[in-house]
Amino acid sequence: MALHLIKLCVGPASIADLEARQARVLAEALREGRAAAPSHVTRTLPKRHREISGQGSIYWVIRGTLSCRQAITAIEPVTGEDGIPRCRLVFDPSLVPVAPRPCRPFQGWRYLTAHDAPADLGAAAAGDLAEMPEALRRELVGLGLL
């Protein structure tokens, strides 16, 4: 069974903002001749990384709402410019909107089992929710109506 991560997305105000930010970073990497895959570098390796890499996803919390996910294709050790070992989470480029869920702030990441993960909005169970604008979904989640 796949294991997922939940991570706060600091900066972007929407899924479109996160896509644009990742596109800018990828374009810059291509210009500089570096590997061009969306990724996030963090200080510590998830203890359960073997259950995540290649089969799990990262679920992004945007402005207090669990909003979308990206498949994690690899988890790689890297060394920062300061010589400190770190961990790079490498993602599939596509962001998949999920059924919104409120989420309180936290530090680092949290694990999410496949059973507890929200459904993708493209799934038939999501119904009209997939067609609703993201800002409206977030507002309804904030009001406790979704």
Image (spheres, rainbow, N blue to C red):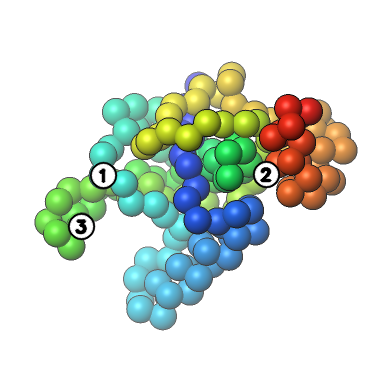
Q: Secondary structure under badge 1?
A: loop
* Residue that mark 3 sits on: 80
- Is residue 54 positioned above or below 17 on the image? above
* Residue that mark 2 sits on: 97
Find the residue positioned furthest to the left.
83
What's under tag 1, amino acid-wise? Arg
Would residue 132 be visible to someone looking at this image?
yes
Percent coordinates x, y for residue 133 in the rendering: 79, 49
* Residue that mark 1 sits on: 43
Percent coordinates x, y for residue 37 in the rendering: 45, 60
Image position of 18 (left or right of 84): right
Q: Residue at x 62, y 31 (%)?
A: 102
Q: Secondary structure under badge 2?
A: strand
Would residue 69 be visible to someone looking at this image?
no
Tag 2: Cα neighbours inside 10 Å, few (<14), some, or many (≥20)? many
Mark 3 or mark 2: whose residue is earlier in sequence? 3
Asked if the residue under mark 3 is in contact with the one under mark 1, i.e. CB atoms within 8 Å, the reply is no
Mark 1 or mark 3: whose residue is earlier in sequence? 1
Tag 3: Cα neighbours inside 10 Å, few (<14), some, or many (≥20)? few
What's under tag 2, amino acid-wise? Pro
| Most foreground residue, 134 or 44 | 134
| Most foreground residue, 45 or 143 | 143
